[in-house]
Amino acid sequence: MRASQRYFFVLLSLLEMEKRGEIISSTKLANAAGLSQQETARVLRLLESEGIISRNLVKGGQEVTLTERGMRFLESVRLQLEDLLSSEVKNTSFEALVSSGLGDGAYYMSLEGYLAEFVKKLGFKPFPGTLNLKITGSFPNRDYLASISKYKIAAFEQEGRVMGALKFVRASVSRGEEEVPGALIFPERTHHSNDVIEFIAPVKVREQLGLKDGDSVVVRVSPRGQRSFLGDPRRTPEYRAPCRLRARNASPARP
């Protein structure tokens, strides 16, 4: 059994035992997961180091508990399985708060290695900068959104430096009735926590939607990468798509 499978079965067993209200010991967990106590101990140490579980010493052994991060991980697995097993195309919508970044987005968005791929795959030249968004709920998180991202730009060398790989997925950001189409990007190298994501668009989103730090927006993600949110774009690097207005009480337009 591969290591990743062992981790998964331990987590599933842990969740099942928690649902039954059992006091969980490492011995019980090993038996439930079908692993040796030695294997289970190795898995538990790794899961604890990743913040997936917590362990407390109690009389006669230790008590194992899923953390909030562990629950989010299992929820992301559930949704990924649901998405893969379903023939129906689903979009993901959630709320996020506008926040400030380090200001390095403008530099990276200007690099030809990234820029050419965005133009080719999204049909627009991004505004030189990213909009940082802090997800308000516990789900989805950055890891899950990156996992459903269809597009990837491989690492490349420019200006004597190696630029890291990057994944992205079509998305839109809206406030009130205005919606700006674009994409969420997920650099492999990032200083952001798991609840912070970056959005790019052909316009400066802060100005277009009148945003300031702390404002709430709705993010809509198209995981299967269907027709662009830009509709039928004139696919040139300089094309700048206008914002779209959404009618009140209308269901979101399918991408």
Image: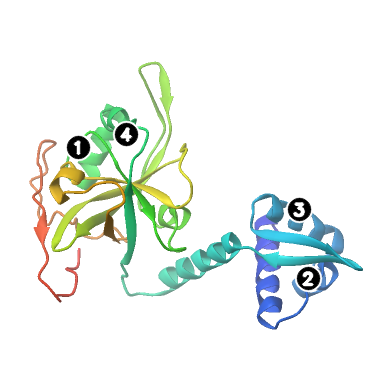
Where 13 falls versus 180 (above or below)? below
Q: Quadrant of residue 198?
A: top left
Where 147 falls versus 192 (above or below)? below
Cα distance in 3D space between marks 3 and 2: 13 Å
Q: Look at label 2 and name its amino acid.
A: Leu
Q: Quadrant of residue 173?
A: bottom left
> Which label's residue is closer to the chain start, 3 or 1?
3
Q: Quadrant of the C terminus?
A: bottom left
Which mark's residue is nearer the viewer, 2 or 4?
Answer: 4
Q: Residue at x 23, y 56 (%)?
A: 172
Which of 100/36 is in front? 100
Q: Look at label 1 and name its amino acid.
A: Phe
Q: Quadrant of residue 28?
A: bottom right
Cα distance in 3D space between marks 1 and 4: 10 Å
> Which label's residue is closer to the chain start, 3 or 2?
2
Q: Residue furthest bottom?
A: 20
Q: Secondary structure at mark 4?
A: helix
Where 133 falls versus 130 (above or below)? below
The reply to whether callout 3 and callout 1 are in contact (CB within 8 Å) is: no
Question: Residue 6: x percent and y percent?
Answer: 71, 62
Q: Residue furthest top?
A: 160
Q: Look at label 3 and name its amino acid.
A: Arg
The residue to which callout 1 is attached is: 127
Q: Secondary structure at mark 1?
A: loop
The dot on residue 45 is: 3
Which of 106/223 is in front? 106
- Mark 4, Cα crowd under 10 Å, few <14 / some 14-19 / many 20+, is some
Cα distance in 3D space between marks 2 and 4: 45 Å
The residue to which callout 4 is attached is: 105
Q: Look at label 4 and name its amino acid.
A: Gly
The dot on residue 29 is: 2
Question: Residue 97: x percent and y percent?
Answer: 33, 54
